[in-house]
């Protein structure tokens, strides 16, 4: 659980009653609340997004630029057999 104070907004969600009950049982097994599980899920979305952006940036930087020691290889040189 987070120990800092932030501005929280209430939202209303809807789902099938059976799914809500199952989620509540899971939250109870994890000794947490459905609200906290939802907040954790939102946090995970942000983390996944940042990781995805970092990976795409890495790929963009690496494309077409391969280096071994001081020698740079072009994409064509790398694909030669």
Image (cartoon, helix red, strand yellow):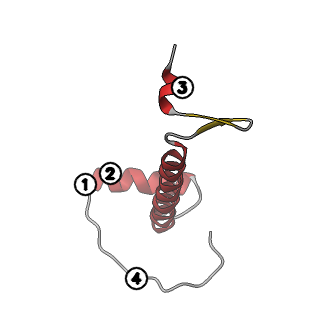
Q: Which residue is mark 2?
A: 19
Q: Residue 37 appears at what percent x and percent y? A: 49, 61
Residue 41: percent from left, percent from top: 47, 59
Could you say where residue 62 lies in the image, as x and y percent from the top left? 54, 44
Residue at image mark 4:
9
Label 2 or label 3, whichever comes before in sequence order: 2
Pick whichever of labels 4 and 1 is earlier in the sequence.
4
Comes first in the chain, label 3 or label 4: 4
Does 23 appear above or below 38? above
Disc 3 marks which residue? 78
Q: Tell me the distance, in whole angstroms, between the alpha carbons under discs 2 and 3.
A: 52 Å
- Mark 1, secondary structure of its residue: loop
Cβ atoms under marks 1 and 2 closer than 8 Å = yes
Which of the two marks, 4 or 1, is nearer to us in this view? 4
Query: Label 1: which residue?
Result: 16
Mark 3 crowdedness (10 Å alpha carbons): few <14, some 14-19, many ≥20: few
In this view, which residue lies farthest toward the right?
A: 69
Q: Is residue 11 left or right of residue 59?
A: left
Residue pictured at 27% horizontal, 56% vertical: 17
Q: Which numbered disc flags the more N-terminal residue, 2 or 4?
A: 4
Rendered residue at 50%/18% (across/down): 80
Q: Position of residue 66 (x, y in %)?
A: 59, 36
Q: CA distance from mark 1 to mark 2?
A: 5 Å
Camera-near label (2 vs 4) is: 4
* Most foreground residue, 76 or 29: 76
Rendered image quadrant of residue 21: bottom left
Q: Which quadrant of the view contains residue 4? A: bottom right
**Closer to us: 34 or 53:** 53
Q: Give the structural element (helix, strand or loop) at label 2.
A: helix
Earlier sequence position, callout 1 versus callout 3: 1
The residues tagged by marks 2 and 4 sit, at their Cα atoms, a distance apart of 23 Å
Q: CA distance from mark 4 to mark 1?
A: 23 Å
């Amino acid at each position: 659980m987070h120990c800092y104070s932030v501005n929280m907004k209430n939202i209303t969600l809807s789902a099938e009653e059976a799914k809500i009950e199952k989620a509540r049982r899971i939250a109870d097994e994890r000794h947490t609340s459905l609200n906290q599980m939802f907040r954790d899920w939102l946090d995970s979305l942000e983390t996944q997004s940042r990781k995805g952006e970092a990976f795409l940036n890495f790929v963009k930087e690496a494309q077409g630029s391969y280096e071994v020691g001081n020698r740079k290889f072009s994409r064509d040189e790398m694909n030669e057999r």
